[in-house]
């Protein structure tokens, strides 16, 4: 391996391992005209960034990863705590996180039909009636706790049942296949 390739690999590795915390002193977030976020850090400018919760179930408002927007994104930095940035910045970040983690809560299960390796759900959520399909036997139903379930449909939309114990006995029986 040539010295150039080795030094390039070392530089890329060092960059990947570096953790840069973003705050109001070193980062400026702005809304773009198309509803996304841009970021300026010193002389660096990112016309579009995406934000991801590093711990979406346990620490929703801490450790927000700010990443480049391309398919093979890379981390630019981390907002350690939403309470550590200005109200305006926190609102912009929260808007983006709400879009990314849109997860309707299932309030009522009307019907679940199992057919040919798929389950067809007919439910009522906190955003209205909904039909969706999941693959059977995969990781479509994730148990977050004894009572909390996250469901991922074939289009990667998420739905949540915060507490299966709040469902009627008939609704819980429809879930037997997944519990």
Image (cartoon, rainbow, N blue to C red):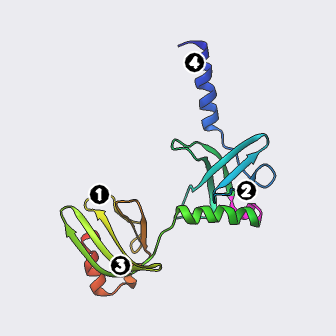
Q: Is residue 117 left or right of residue 30?
A: left
Q: Position of residue 144 (x, y in %)?
A: 42, 66
Magenta part of the chain: 81-86
Q: Position of residue 121 (x, y in %)?
A: 30, 73
Residue ID for mark 1: 138
Numbered tag placed on residue 5 in the rendering: 4
Q: Position of residue 43 (x, y in %)?
A: 78, 40
Q: Secondary structure at mark 4?
A: helix
3D distance between C-alphas at marks 1 and 3: 20 Å
Tag in front: 3 or 2: 2
Tag in front: 1 or 3: 3
Tag in front: 3 or 4: 3
Question: Which residue is at the far left?
Answer: 116
- Of the two numbered discs 1 and 3 on the same chain, state the one appearing first in sequence: 3
Judge by depth and name the residue closer to the eye, 161 or 39: 39
Give the residue at x 48% y 69%: 103
Judge by depth and name the residue closer to the eye, 164 or 146: 164
3D distance between C-alphas at marks 3 and 4: 55 Å
Residue ID for mark 3: 123
3D distance between C-alphas at marks 2 and 4: 37 Å
Tag in front: 1 or 2: 2
Q: Relative to 122, is 79 above or below?
A: above
Q: Is residue 61 left or right of residue 130?
A: right
- Of the two numbered discs 2 and 4 on the same chain, state the one appearing first in sequence: 4
| Cβ atoms at labels 1 and 2 below 8 Å apart | no
Residue ID for mark 2: 30
Q: Secondary structure at mark 1?
A: loop
- Of the two numbered discs 1 and 2 on the same chain, state the one appearing first in sequence: 2
């Amino acid at each position: 391996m040539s010295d150039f390739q080795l030094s390039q690999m070392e530089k890329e590795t060092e960059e990947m391992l570096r953790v840069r915390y973003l705050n109001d002193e070193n980062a400026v977030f702005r809304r773009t005209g198309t509803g996304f976020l841009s970021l300026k850090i010193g002389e660096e400018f990112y016309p579009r960034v995406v934000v991801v919760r590093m711990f979406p179930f346990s620490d929703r408002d801490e450790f927000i990863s700010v990443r480049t927007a391309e398919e093979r994104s890379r981390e630019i930095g981390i907002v350690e705590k939403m309470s550590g940035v200005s109200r305006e910045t926190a609102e912009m970040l929260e808007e983006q996180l709400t879009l990314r983690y849109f997860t309707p809560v299932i309030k009522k299960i009307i019907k679940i039909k199992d057919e040919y390796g798929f389950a067809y759900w007919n439910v009522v959520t906190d955003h209205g009636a909904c039909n969706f399909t999941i693959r059977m036997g995969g990781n479509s139903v994730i148990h977050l706790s004894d009572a909390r379930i996250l469901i991922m449909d074939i289009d990667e939309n998420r739905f949540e049942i915060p507490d299966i114990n709040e469902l009627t006995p008939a609704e819980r029986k429809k879930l037997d296949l997944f519990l």
